[in-house]
Image (tube, helix red, strand yellow):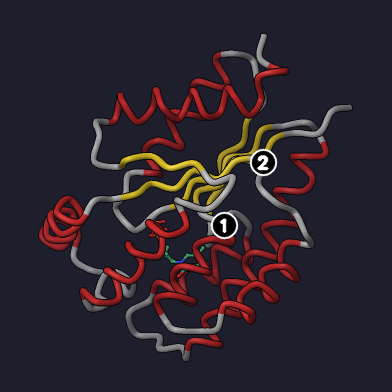
Amino acid sequence: MRKGFFIVLEGPDRSGKSTQAVLLKEWLEQQGMQTILTREPGGTAISEKIRKILLDPQVKAVPVAELFLFAVSRSQHTAEIIKPALAAGKIVISDRFTMSTEAYQGYGRGLPAGMIRTVNRIATEGIKPDLTVVFDVPEQEFEKRIREAEEKNGPDRFEREDIEFRRRIQKAYRTFSRRKGIKRIDASKSIDEIQSELRVLVSETIKDDIR
Ligand code: TYD
């Protein structure tokens, strides 16, 4: 049985990746490809509970504790959802993965890159995405989206972080989007344009299997 494909969408909060993930899954399924859509933190019973802790504005975790909470969530998610789906030849789309920890706990909270790499490697059992797409949000668009989100939803723990934290995240993703092997999408484009670009990137990755 052929191995599945592991696609990861990354980017700052409000970059639009979750909307795109849903559209991508629909498109792949229309072509008869078995696809699962999952997210981090989340996707399993343990991970959803950890997600609640992490996103609770009343809970204050020091950076290392936060790193480990994400790692617990990721190890369960990898073992319970991602690995079995890939072994069954499915396409797995994950809304966030290890790069989020590099961005938020590394660039955002200031934890050393080496520590994050080690924890990520343990949590993922070495599983690596076949394709990572970074949603890169240009500066002005970024500020606009923050204001809109706060007006509409009221902030959660991560959305209440100061503007400097969020700028560090945006810059981190901008830097990561230039890494070898990483694909970048301009998140200020329209939903349709982004979806078309995403489909091209995914098709290139799995081209031998799309008929
Ligand atoms: P969520 O509401 O899912 O945000 P989004 O829809 O933008 O993905 O909340 C997840 C938050 O957790 C988000 O602010 C990013 C953060 N996060 C980390 O700090 N580290 C991580 O390793 C992951 C996976 C997420």
Give the residue drawn at x 70%, y 49%.
Answer: 81
| Residue 87: x %, y % from top left | 82, 39
Q: Residues within 10 Å of mark 2 (few under 14, many from 20)?
A: some
Q: Nearer the viewer, mark 2 or mark 1?
A: 2
**Which quadrant, please, contains the C terminus?**
top right
Residue 116 image position (x, y, % from top left):
61, 76
Q: Residue 76 lies in what quarter of the image? A: bottom right
Residue 104 coordinates in the image, percent (x, y): 44, 71
Q: Amino acid at mark 2?
A: Asp
Q: Quadrant of the N terminus?
A: top right
Structural crowding at the residue carrying mark 1, measured as other residues with C-alpha within 10 Å and reported as few (<14), some (14–19) or many (≥20): many
The residue at label 1 has a CB less than 8 Å from ligand 1: yes
Which residue shows up at 52% across the image and 53% down it?
Answer: 179
Secondary element under disc 2, as helix, strand or loop, is loop
Give the quadrant of ligand 1.
Answer: bottom left
In the displayed structure, 3 sits above or below 192; it is below
- In the displayed structure, would residue 38 be above or below residue 142? above
Residue at image location 53% in from the left, 60% down from the top: 99
Q: Nearer the viewer, residue 184 or 71?
A: 184
Query: How far apart in space, not on screen, are marks 2 and 1 (Cα)?
Result: 12 Å
| Residue wearing tag 1 | 97
Q: As shown in the figure, which amino acid type bears the numbered disc 1?
A: Phe
Report the label total.
2
Numbered tag placed on residue 45 in the rendering: none
Residue corresponding to mark 2: 130
- Looking at the image, residue 21 sits to the left or right of residue 86; the answer is left
In depth, the one of 136 and 51 nearer the eye is 136
